[in-house]
Image (spheres, rainbow, N blue to C red):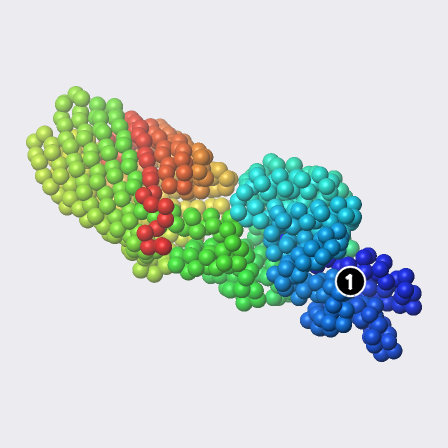
Amino acid sequence: MKLKPFVLFIFFISSIVAYSQNMQEGFTYLETGKYNEAEAFFKHILKEYPNNKTARLCFGRAVGLNGNPEQAKILFTNLLADYPNDFEVKLNYGESLLWNKEFNQAKTYFKNLIKEDPKSFPALLSYANTLSNLKDYENALIYVDKALEVSNNNPNALTSKKYMHLGYAYQNQQAQNYDVAEAILKKNLELFKDDKDTLLNLANLYLIANRLEDAETTYTILSKNPENKILALNGLSLVAHLNGKEKKALALSSQAYESLEASSDEKTEQQTTERYIQALIWNKKYKPANTLINSIIETNPNENWILALRATLNIYKSDFKKSLDDYNLILQNDSTSFDGNLGKANALKALGKYDDAYTSAENTLKFYNKQKDATNFITTLNNNFTPFYEGKASYSFDNGDNEAFAFSNNLEFPLSTKFKVLGNYNYRTTKNTTTNNKATSNDFSLGLSYQLIPTITFKGTAGITSANASSSDYTQLLTDISFNIKPYKLQDLTIGYKREIQSFNAELLDREIVQNNFYANYNVSTNFNLGWFTQYFYTSQNDDNTRNLLFTSLYYNILPKPSLKAGLNYQYITFKDQVPTVYFSPEKFNAGEVFVNIIKDEAITKPKEWFYELTAATGLQFIENNKSQSTYRVQGKLGYSFSDRCLANIFGTRSNIASTTAAGFTFTEIGIRFKWLLFDKPLFRD
């Protein structure tokens, strides 16, 4: 936050007006900012009086303030050569250094002037402003206070002090010293009660620190001044969005948008239109948002702010390639654009181009050092590629007197954004308390995951299971090979092959039933909250039986935060052979249910916060041609994120829905899970 160089009008004019009444017209031009007229006036005077010091000073000031600081510096250098001991000339030469942004040279120069005259108000204030431009706000405030001691309540010095406080607060905000920044801004409000700039900076600080209630209070204070009403409504709309209250955000933004008048300044009109379009997008009102964006682009085809809005709209619609095109246009216009650089990073991440996403986010930080959103983006991306360990322990039982203890361990080591090494060990022991039949299995597997192209990822694991059962001990091969494919936007397809052992209970484990599963999972999302998931398994077993399993779910996303959805599930199972005394193997099984799911995703949970998930479902199942049976299913988890690297949760399931193992039963499972990122960043990043 830079300050405009201080103009020495009052001091300068008061010292010369007494003997220069014939130049009053020129002085008036300078005082009123008519620098073209002032430059022409004093140029004419100098033709008649080329050596008049006052005219030369005024001409130099007019030239500098009229946008030619280099020429002004030359003029004042010549004056200084003619009047080396004239303090007034020295002050004006010093100010020309500020005009030319030669702040380090100006710092030394004004420091020497202060030694020459410690009570010179212009020298003290110019030195303070120089330090402020060098972002040495702490010392700048010391010297502006010294200037105010010389000229109490001087409006120019007070204005400088205000902007020094704003700059100092912003500096601390960037360093994430939020408490210090808040104290500085509140001190500014003591000097400038309800100052618009200070309140806006304070509200923005609260937004960054996620103190949304304080931000709302600050915007409410701002709104008390009718002149700031629209700005306040824009801010309150953003607060409502961050609180997940999208309808309120749109209502507030609509009020601001409708309050715009022909007399509204261009900046306010742009900010308000921008917030209104954002609110439409947040509420998934894509058609009116697109219509308004297109109407603005017709007259402003190359404006970055409207291109950024179109890019945002396409992000929400999952048109990531179109979004990327707009971000590239923004960067062609301005390579330092925050929206362009970080927006491009988000689009690239969504397209699976993770190395390029890193590069774009790091470019953002080159221009905006320590910027929180960019830093958080890189942290999130790092967490996706940091080696981690995940452990899970569970206890389950059913009404068939089966009990099981299971312990799973997973390791994942990304060696690049495309390549991961996978490791897994599972231990499971199960018994039947009635028959006293017991069995234990140990599974080991290693594998890899490789992103072939941004839309296709291969994953393969292979290993062995070692089983110890009542009547047999054996070892079998395990494998799981799959391709995850994103064929079109909002679609996800996984096809694969999985070889596994039936291990639900001790009797099944003892029978050494090997399953060869060929499967496909397909999910389709939409921009109108409807989704459809379908899963199909074809299974051949080493007992010559085969199975077909179809599961499909149609669901509707009711709320985004926390995620709330409801829907209908349907499941169909058929076996070639029926062996009911061994395992659940109906010729025909149909089940339907309605479900509700609420979730606060652990992936977006911040450190020191809770996450959770709860699913409740009820329906009917039809086994063969028998009468329908009512079903229920309850699943839940509750967890806590201890830090960016560590989280844990408990989980549980209770269900009476038939499965491939049994019919007419109830099943219960409870457990605990722990996940820990082994390092603070990916192994492949320095």
Q: Is residue 243 left or right of residue 627?
A: right
Residue 181 coordinates in the image, percent (x, y): 59, 43
Residue 14 coordinates in the image, percent (x, y): 85, 58
Q: Which SS class for mark 1?
A: helix
Residue 608 coordinates in the image, percent (x, y): 44, 35
| Residue 451 is at least partly visible in this image | yes
- Dot 1 amino acid type: Glu
The residue positioned farthest toward the bottom in the image shown: 47
Camera-side residue of 343 and 613: 343
Q: Is residue 404 above or below residue 221?
A: above
Question: Which residue does the image show at 75% across and 51% down from the upper left?
Answer: 119
Q: Is residue 276 left or right of residue 638?
A: right
Q: Is residue 575 above or below residue 627?
A: below
| Residue 344 is at least partly visible in this image | no
The residue positioned farthest toward the top in the image shown: 434
Task: State the count of labels.
Answer: 1
Q: Is residue 442 above or below residue 57?
A: above
Residue 18 coordinates in the image, percent (x, y): 90, 61
Q: Is residue 439 left or right of residue 646?
A: left
Q: Is residue 305 left or right of residue 514?
A: right
Question: Which residue does the image show at 41% across and 50% down from the upper left?
Answer: 381
Image quarter where the C terminus lies is bottom left
Question: Which residue does the image show at 44% across and 51% down from the upper left?
Answer: 378
Question: Which residue does the image show at 68% across and 49% down from the upper left?
Answer: 143
- Which residue corresponds to mark 1? 88
